[in-house]
Image (cartoon, grey):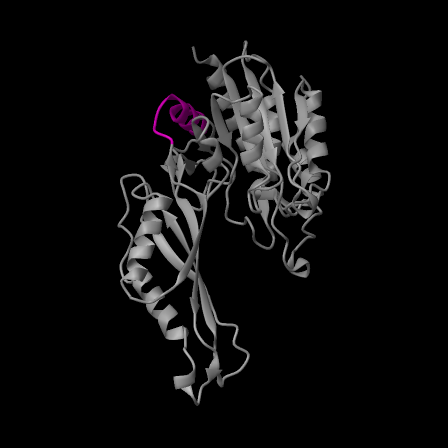
Amino acid sequence: MAAVDPVELTTRMIRCPSVTPKDAGVLDVVAAELKRLGFKCTRLPFGDGAARVDNLFARRGHGAPHFCFAGHVDVVPPGDEAAWTTPPFAGDVRDGQIWGRGAADMKGAVACFVAAVARVDDIGDGSISLLLTGDEEGPGINGTVKVLEWMAEHGQVPDVALVGEPTNPAALGDAIKVGRRGSMTGRIRVRGTQGHVAYPHLADNPVPRIVALLAALTAAPLDTGSARFEASNLEITTVDVGNPANNIIPGAARAVFNIRFNDLHTSASLTELVRARMDATGHAYELEIEVSGESFLTEAGPFTDLITEAVRDVTGRAPEQSTAGGTSDARFLTRYCPVAEFGLVGQTMHKIDERVAVADLAALTDVYAAILRRFFATP
């Protein structure tokens, strides 16, 4: 089977400025390589107009066991392009590193998996697939979640899934992600009556009330952590009244908070807790809750052991089985099959001068190839 150079493929992918939800040709680049490797590629666009997202499902083989690699080809905006050492979408290779938006998160990992697949011929009656989305850095509505629904409808659900997010804090081999905290956002609105500050009896100021509500929410920690997760945290992210003048009592006040929560809670139980704390103040409020994902944990077993062994053999490190960090599309995959995450070092992701070591691309390709060989050698 023809070899794939992960450095060259990463470079070509970076040169497609696929800022969410734009594809910018990056899926064409990946699909061309996969077709050359014997994959059947299916493009799966979802959404309309500006919300339209292009996705790719590719599979080689038809039987079981079925190993799925999941990832995203969209990237966050580059920010101040003049502040970059090299242009963010040039994909320059210098000083032993590939520079560019998406190098670490996560075009490099996608290229490494494609390169690994090119090395693994013997999968018996099994199959390998890739689920690639352009909606991971965005709202997550028309990406992985809908591709998985399509896969379920068409008999394409995998036995296990590996997500190529940058899981390593400092060095390749530091950590495998085996779970994630849940995430939910709350939007509070307190209504008042606008008026002149000199005549407060003719107005109703909502600001003291929203301050009291926020104080009630943050007065006590949600928990101190669990056996496999760090403590849940509630963070107030904005408080707004939209007041253009200093002599007007505003007519409404708004605030937004986000909760990252462990397996001691669900979004439903936290919604009850949030309401109970705010109700205790006696103040009227309006609350909207948006849930982007529940917490999940993939229990230790053959799949996580297999990944750990492959990482240890290639890197010489014993990776931590971690649940730290934010959310990922693994929160959707866990509804269908066991899922874990392993990718590149994440120190520069989303930053100016995002980059990845060329040596890490070679090592990650070795890790992915070792994972596949172990998986398909399992009785």
Task: Please tell me which residue is depicted at 47% across the width and 13% down the height of the picture.
Answer: 377
Q: What is the x, y in percent for residue 47?
A: 65, 40
Q: Main secondary structure of the magenta part?
A: helix
Q: Residue furthest front?
A: 202
Q: Residue furthest bottom?
A: 198
Q: Nearer the viewer, residue 320 or 217?
A: 217
Magenta stretch containing residue 272, yes or no?
no
Whether residue 369 is visible, yes or no, is no
Q: What is the x, y in percent for residue 116?
A: 58, 25
Q: What is the x, y in percent for residue 201?
A: 39, 85
Residue 91 in the image: above or below residue 277: above
Whether residue 194 is visible, yes or no, is yes
Task: Please tell me which residue is depicted at 59% across the width and 42% down the height of the picture.
Answer: 135
Q: Nearer the viewer, residue 307 or 216?
A: 216
With 285 as the anchor, is 156 left or right in this view? right
- The quadrant of the image that shows the N terminus is top right
Task: Please tell me which residue is depicted at 48% across the width and 35% down the height of the picture.
Answer: 332
Q: Nearer the viewer, residue 224 or 124?
A: 224
- The quadrant of the image that shows the C terminus is top left
Q: Nearer the viewer, residue 120 or 337?
A: 337
Magenta stretch containing residue 299, yes or no?
yes
Q: What is the x, y in percent for residue 292?
A: 47, 45
In magenta, the rendered stretch is: 298-312
Residue 131 in the image: above or below residue 236: above
Among the 4 quarters of the image, the one containing residue 105: top right
With 152 as the anchor, is 272 left or right in this view? left
Among the 4 quarters of the image, the one containing residue 220: bottom left
